[in-house]
Amino acid sequence: MSEISKTFDRLANCKILIVGDVMLDRYLRGKVDRVSPEAPVPVVNLQSAENRLGGAANVALNIQAMGAQAILCSVIGKDVDGQLFADLLPQSNIASHYLFNSDSRPTTVKTRVIAANQHLLRVDRESTMDLNSTEEEGLLNNILSAMDHHKIDLLLLQDYNKGVLSLALLQKVQTEAQKRNIPIAVDPKFSNFFEYKNATLFKPNLKEIQEALGQTIAPQKEALDQAVALLKNKLPHQYTLITLSEKGIYWNDGNSSEVMPTQARNISDVCGAGDTVISVAALGLAAGLSIREISRLSNLAGGQVCESVGVVPVNRLQLEKEYAQLLAALH
């Protein structure tokens, strides 16, 4: 067995606990032949409708696609869309019993209208209010139960600012993970950006870190080094990973740093690329890979899913092949 195959087997042996906002990704696909006589908008002749797991559930899909185990903790509504969401989980071997079903908030649904592989419109149905006390207590009990019943290799906090990672819940979950010596990876959003203290891996994108620090940051090593120094003064953590869109990915371990460029690809859709990056990065961290290896793998994985239309999980076999090719080229 090659060293690369052994590395991928190590990734597949990990068990990741994911806590964050889940959503249903709905795709309405059709054909456009004319403009509406009622307004200057295209008329879509609907040909198909599809529901997929989205948000933190897409992160779980990526974890499972790599052969590892994802344990998903979140909140959905007691509604038709919540049932549709729960029904999709077994198809990907993801358990639904750590989800809390809420009477008072809807299941988040993002509906995308697509024609000729082009996004025409997105319609969101959601609540972005923080969890109420009943929802918070129910979800926290599910998280503690998951930690008690599974040997968790890493806790992944996946925030989309939909209210599941409320400040109170966040503090309790981080404290519990640290008490149990479970490393924490964070994919932050704006609201609680500076509340993820002492994480093992912190992965904002360039836009998020610019907004958090209130300054424009060039996607170059020197500027990013300075930004991370400022960030760590406000938010202590071990490793920083910053996605730079088409410019690649930046990593910093406190001593060294690097910007890794993306590979040339035919980009169809960037939706879900960040989910894939944090999924592979979390697995790499749980498996004990170096931050450089983690960055290489997650950079490749994020680029790979951009070649497909819509949110799709990573293809492990393709990633393993591309990783082997990359390492051969570097040597």
Image (cartoon, grey):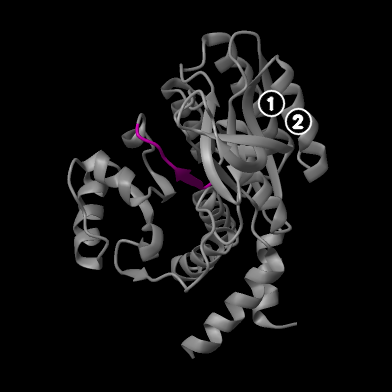
Residue at 70% over, 35% down: 46
Separation of residues labelled 2 and 1 (CA atoms): 6 Å
**For the residue carrying disc 1, how many other residues have a C-alpha within 10 Å: few (<14), some (14-19), or many (20+)?**
many
Tags 2 and 1 touching, CB below 8 Å = yes
Q: Position of residue 251 (x, y in %)?
A: 37, 63
Q: Which mark is residue 99?
A: 1
Q: Nearer the viewer, residue 174 or 7?
A: 7
Query: Is 277 situated above or below 17?
Result: below
Q: Nearer the viewer, residue 142 or 177?
A: 142
Q: Nearer the viewer, residue 255 or 103?
A: 103
- Viewed as shown, does residue 210 lie left or right of 201? left
Which amino acid is tagged 2? Answer: Ser
Q: Where are the magenta residues, as a range?
A: 181-190
Q: Position of residue 240 (x, y in %)?
A: 37, 55
Q: Which residue is mark 2?
A: 96
Query: Is 285 situated above or below 215?
Result: below
| Helix, strand or loop status at disc 1 | strand
| Helix, strand or loop status at disc 2 | loop
Residue occupying the far front of the picture: 37
Which quadrant would the N terminus be assigned to in this image? bottom right
**For the residue carrying disc 2, how many other residues have a C-alpha within 10 Å: few (<14), some (14-19), or many (20+)?**
some
Judge whether residue 183 is colored magenta.
yes
Which amino acid is tagged 1? Answer: Leu
Judge whether residue 215 is colored magenta.
no
Q: Position of residue 289 (x, y in %)?
A: 54, 67
Q: Position of residue 191 (x, y in %)?
A: 35, 29
